[in-house]
Structures are given as C-alpha cells and as structure tokens.
Amino acid sequence: MSFGWIDAEQFSFNTLLLMDRWIFRTIAKNQHPEFKKNLAIALAGNPTVFWYVVSKCPEQREYYHVLVGEAPTNHSREELRDSEVYVLDALDWAVVYVYPNIMENLPYIKDWDKDRLLSITDFNDKTVLDIGSGTGRLAFAAATVARTVFASEPVDRLREYMREKQKRLEVDNIYVIDGTIEMLPFPNESFDIVVSGHVLGDDYEAEWREMSRVTRPGGYVIVCPGEDDRKKPEGPSEELISLGFEYSHYVSKTGGDVCRYWRQKR
C-alpha cells in the first residue's frame, strides 16, 4: 500500500541500504504477487542491496533467496528501474522511516495538534508509553505534562532522530528504547497510559492484550492517529470498537476523517 508520501522516482534503490532488520522482516510479510515480482527483479538487479538485506535480516534469508531465485531474467535497464520505482513507491512508509526529516514534515505530523492527544485523559504526572513512536509526535506531546515517557521504536534511525531531538529541545523526561507492539520490553502494569498512533492492525486482539498487559488497572490505552486528508465513509474501526474502545471523530485540518480511540483498563 502506498500512502503517496514521496515521489518514488526521486529516490535510488540504494535507499534500502539505510533500512534495518525490522523493516526487512516487515517487507517479507507483503505477499502481494505484483509487489513480490517487482521486489525480486529489483533485488536481483542490485546485488549489493540484496547482499545487505539478507545480511541484515538473517531470519528471512531463505525467503529473500527464494524470491530472487524466481526473478524474471533478461529485463532491460528501463524495466529494472520501473521495478525499483514500483517497490520504493509501495515502501514509501519505510523510505520516510530512514529519512526522519522528511517524515517530520509530512502533513499527518506537521499539521497535528498535541491537544488531540492531551484532551483524551489527564496526562499530568503520569508514566506513559508511546508504541511505534516514529519521530516522537505523541511522545513529545505527552512529555509536556507527563512525569516520564518511554518512546518505543524498532527503527534505529528514528530512535537516533528522537534522541537528537531531545537534546535540541532540552527534553529530559523521554527515554527512547527499542521495542515492538508484539513484545514490549516491560513488566506487567508498568504504565498509567499507553498510546500509539499507526501501529495496530496486524492482529488487533494480540496487540490489545500486549498493550493492556503493561497498563496499570485504571489506566488508559489510547490510539491517536495523526492528521489525514482521506474521507472514510466506512466510519470508525470496527475492530477497535469490538475490543471495547470508545472513540471520537473530527475532520482534520487537511479535510479528512480522523477517529481517536481509548479504553480504560479495569
């Protein structure tokens, strides 16, 4: 799925050399036939990038070797570039992860107002976990009033970006750590509030269980997306509502529909 965040033709396929293990594991989950075909052609035509991918992500080495082994052959340089652009466009989410300065200036972050998060519940003097923190949209908002914020992010370039941002803004109550929503590196009932923006969706029930596990009784789990320019006639997330989340809707600054969700742990 492409979000239209970048012009893929402006990027070299060598951009993959900036990506890390978690990204390559996630890419391997995309089983769309057209994506796999173009990824196979692009990797076969870029042996240095292919070597980097399988070296960086050994647990998916066999998958990528089989993929490249099945790649169509005898394609022209133009056809190779077409496949590279197709892959980069499909991976626009991953491209912006390795260029945090681009990500920070995307409308869904730049146009977002921190009150969209802070108005959901009382963050004052709370201990907060932000899952999939990215460039810190939610973490830095919460840190203005919370006692302590842990920013969990699996992409190393984003972690480094947040640490540099901390120094620049002189924020001393955020702790940036490596972690994913599937397996959070914290004991049970560690946080008053657990927040996320765009990480749920692979397995809602399992993700909710893990978020709930690290939340204290009486605490809140919050899903607070950024701004969106898309109209969503389908309405709020049926999956989150079925898990007991409440929600509120607003029309974003860019004209799209945004729903915020929250659930208090009993």
Image (cartoon, grey):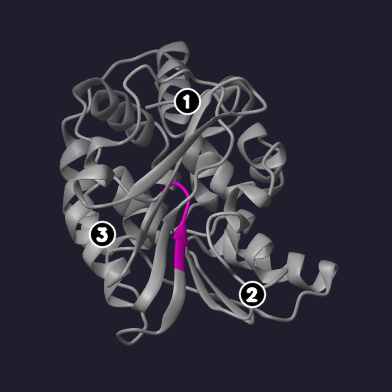
Label 2: few (<14), some (14–19) or many (≥20) C-alpha neighbours in 10 Å: some
Instruction: Name the side, left or right, on which 59 lies relative to 110.
Output: left
The quarter holding residue 221 reads: bottom left
- The N terminus is located in which quarter? top left
Using the numbered discs, state the Cα–Cα distance from disc 3 to disc 1 in whole angstroms: 27 Å
Residue type, mark 3 in image: Glu
Where residue 196 sits, quadrant-wise, is bottom left
| Quadrant of the image occupied by residue 9 | top right
Mark 3 or mark 2: which is in front?
2
Find the magenta span and give its range: 194-198
Residue 179 in percent (x, y) is at 40, 70
Mark 1–mark 2 distance (CA, rounded to whole Å): 41 Å
Label 3 vs label 2: CA separation? 26 Å
Q: Estimate the x, y position of residue 47 in percent, counting from the top left.
A: 39, 42
Magenta stretch holds residue 197: yes
Residue 216 part of the magenta segment: no
State the mark number for residue 207.
Answer: 3
Please name the residue shown 31% across and 21% down the image: 234
Q: Left or right of 32: which side holds 221?
A: right
Decide if residue 125 is on the left or right side of residue 265: right
Q: Nearer the viewer, residue 127 or 2?
A: 127
Q: Secondary structure at mark 3?
A: helix
For the C terminus, the quadrant is bottom left
Label 2 SS:
loop
Residue at 64 percent across and 24 percent down: it is: 10
Q: Nearer the viewer, residue 34 or 254?
A: 254
Examine the rendered structure and indicate whether residue 214 appears above or below residue 42: below
The disc label shown at residue 124, or none: 2
Amino acid type for the residue under numbered disc 1 = Asp
Q: Report the disc number at residue 176.
A: none
The residue that disc 1 covers is 89
In the depicted structure, whether residue 254 falls above or below residue 226: above
